[in-house]
Image (cartoon, rainbow, N blue to C red):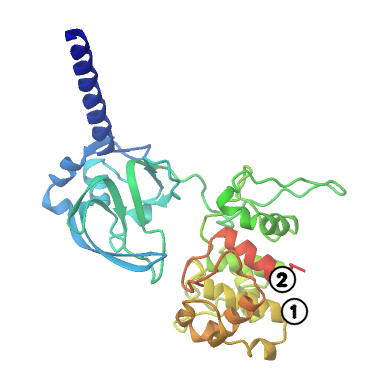
Amino acid sequence: MKKTKVISLVLAIVLILSQSAVFAAEDTLEIGGALVESELKFTLDELKAMPEEAQIDQEYVYNSKSGENLVEVKGVSLAYLLKEEAGLSVEEGKVEFIASDGYEIDPQTLEDILNEELNFVLAYEVDGEELSQVTIYRNLKEEGEFNTVYKFICKINIDEAEVVETESPEEEPVTEPEEDEEVEIVFTDISDDYKFAEAAIYDLAARKIIDGMGEGLYAPGNEFTREQFCKIIVVALGYDLKDYEGAFSDLAEDRWSAPYVQAAVDSGLFIGNPDGTFMPEKVISRQEMAVVVARAAVAKGLVEAERLEKFVMEKSDYIDKDDVADWAGNAVAWLEAEKVFEGIADENFEATKNVNRAEAAVVVYNTLFLE
């Protein structure tokens, strides 16, 4: 009987110690990588004890399927830790957030991390409730943006960027085959989350409208910019490239996208901004993309401009149809009727949501090539 009690007591102690070890691991954050001089490790209590100049106490806005949310966040500035504690001395690189639950998070740029306006914070308290593991918040780049909260972060790696952009920042051109030689295109990173776009991606890749990132990767979740969309829509319509005329203050003559932008602007697919900028690196939104592909459909003779203008958002089935800008209404309504966004936007259209590479492929394919 005594022996049984001793064994039970030992097992109980082992269980308590093992649980304590798990909790200790959960509230520990590691920071390391090739670009920092010192690798760091913090518990949540140690983050709370950081000096006042490291602390952040402010409201953060983030978007979810339920709409816009506002939370009061207390935490430590990630930029402060990197510069003051880890000895970071560069401003360009790749930052990886690693989540303890294995959820994949797209790499961040070091430039964004150090941007005071974005104000990345390692949160240890949200709306007065203490967290068991670090959650990272940042400010919105633009209204309606998603993916600005990163949960259960246990490690942060800061390394050199993998690719130095010299030509197109989005793509590594597919090697031209010899005459009569067929090259099989295979992308290894189209996960179940992006199966909805697989047929479109492979079709556009076969047409050489859109390329991969090299090494068998397509990167379906990466965001798509205005200049990148200029490229694929110009190529999709078979337009000739044009010499850049220098009309935009933020687009250099030697930029890789300049001939595509000029061709897109000359053909009326894109327009610039009233202040004389084009914003080539701005991520294109769903409603912006809708307008461009609708114009492309008109140019290709798939729909007459007069007919397209008869489609209005008042008859739309989207719950958030009132959020679609007036200048995009006809295009969105026509594309909805053509089921172009089916599988991407079902109950809500989310007009200002950023477009990724998978969605861009689907919308171009469904609009211009799906029979």
Horizontal and vertical percent for residue 229?
59, 67
Q: Vertically, is 308 above or below 342?
A: below
Q: Residue furthest right?
A: 180
- Identify residue for label 1: 302
Q: Which residue is drawn at 50% across and 86% down?
A: 326
Q: Relative to 115, is 247 on the left or the right?
A: right
Horizontal and vertical percent for residue 54?
17, 51
Q: In this view of the protein, which residue sits in the foreground, 253 or 197?
A: 197
Q: Relative to 62, is 49 on the left or the right?
A: left
Q: Residues within 10 Å of mark 2 (few under 14, many from 20)?
A: many
Horizontal and vertical percent for residue 357?
57, 59
Amino acid at pointer 2:
Leu
Q: Are marks 2 and 1 in contact (CB under 8 Å)?
A: yes
Amino acid at pointer 1:
Leu
- Identify residue for label 2: 368
Q: In this view of the protein, which residue sits in the foreground, 247 or 109?
A: 109
Q: Which residue is drawn at 20% across and 59% down?
A: 127
Q: Vertically, is 64 above or below 327?
A: above
Q: Mark 2 falls on what kind of element?
A: helix
Instruction: Find residue 116 and report its image quarter.
Output: bottom left
Quadrant where the C terminus lies? Answer: bottom right
Horizontal and vertical percent for residue 237?
72, 71
Q: Vertically, is 34 above or below 18?
A: below
Q: In this view of the protein, which residue sits in the foreground, 361 or 118?
A: 361
